[in-house]
Amino acid sequence: MANAASGMAVNDECKLKFQELKAKRSYRFITFKIDQQQVVVDKLGGPNDSYDDFQASLPNDECRYAVYDFDFTTDEKCQKSKIFFVAWSPDSSRVRMKMVYASSKDRFKRELDGIQVEIQATDPSEMSLDIVKARAL
């Protein structure tokens, strides 16, 4: 399925792995990249991987999309989980790459049913664990 605006297709594996993250909690995170005019799975984080592992999986000079299954405890001591969508677009990535990722983001995000929070980040400080916690509550 190509996006009319960006000409980008979404590989079926992206949706399949996302469903496994959401329903079975098989992964803590998934990163996605655009390769040859389609969005494909880049990396899978195991269920016991930490937020630091997730941040380390994002390249310093290339854009990525990512989803992260964030577990937290509310002030009322309830265990909760929210699925974050991260649009990673580091300042050091190429302008063309940033444009392609920006124009394809909404279309790709619609394919992943169950996203609860979105974060756009250009450097790690914009997606620190404190920011994620604040956005989850």
Image (spheres, grey):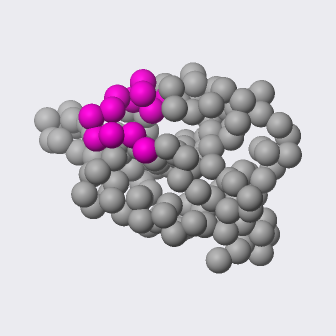
Magenta-span inclusion, residue 93:
no
Q: Nearer the viewer, residue 81 or 26?
A: 26
Q: Position of residue 79 (x, y in %)?
A: 17, 41
| Residue for point 78% across, 65% down | 6
Q: Is residue 53 above or below residue 33?
A: above
Task: Kindly indicate the quadrant of the structure image that contains residue 11.
Answer: bottom right
| Residue for point 27% across, 61% down | 23
Please indicate whether residue 10 sits to the left or right of residue 91 in the image: left
Quarter holding the N terminus is bottom right
Q: Is residue 118 above or below residue 39?
A: above
| Residue for point 45% across, 32% down | 54
Task: Kindly indicate the quadrant of the structure image that contains residue 104.
Answer: bottom right
Magenta-span inclusion, residue 49:
yes
Q: Position of residue 133 (x, y in %)?
A: 38, 32
| Residue for point 79% across, 45% down | 97
Q: Residue furthest right?
A: 96
Q: Is residue 131 visible?
A: no
| Number of dots carrying numbers | 0
Q: Position of residue 43 (x, y in %)?
A: 49, 43
Please indicate whether residue 114 sits to the left or right of residue 65 in the image: left
Please indicate whether residue 52 sits to the left or right of residue 93 in the image: left
Q: Position of residue 125 (x, y in %)?
A: 57, 22
Q: Residue furthest front?
A: 36
Q: Is residue 50 visible?
A: yes
Q: Nearer the viewer, residue 15 or 69?
A: 15
Quarter holding the C terminus is top left
| Magenta stretch bounds | 44-55
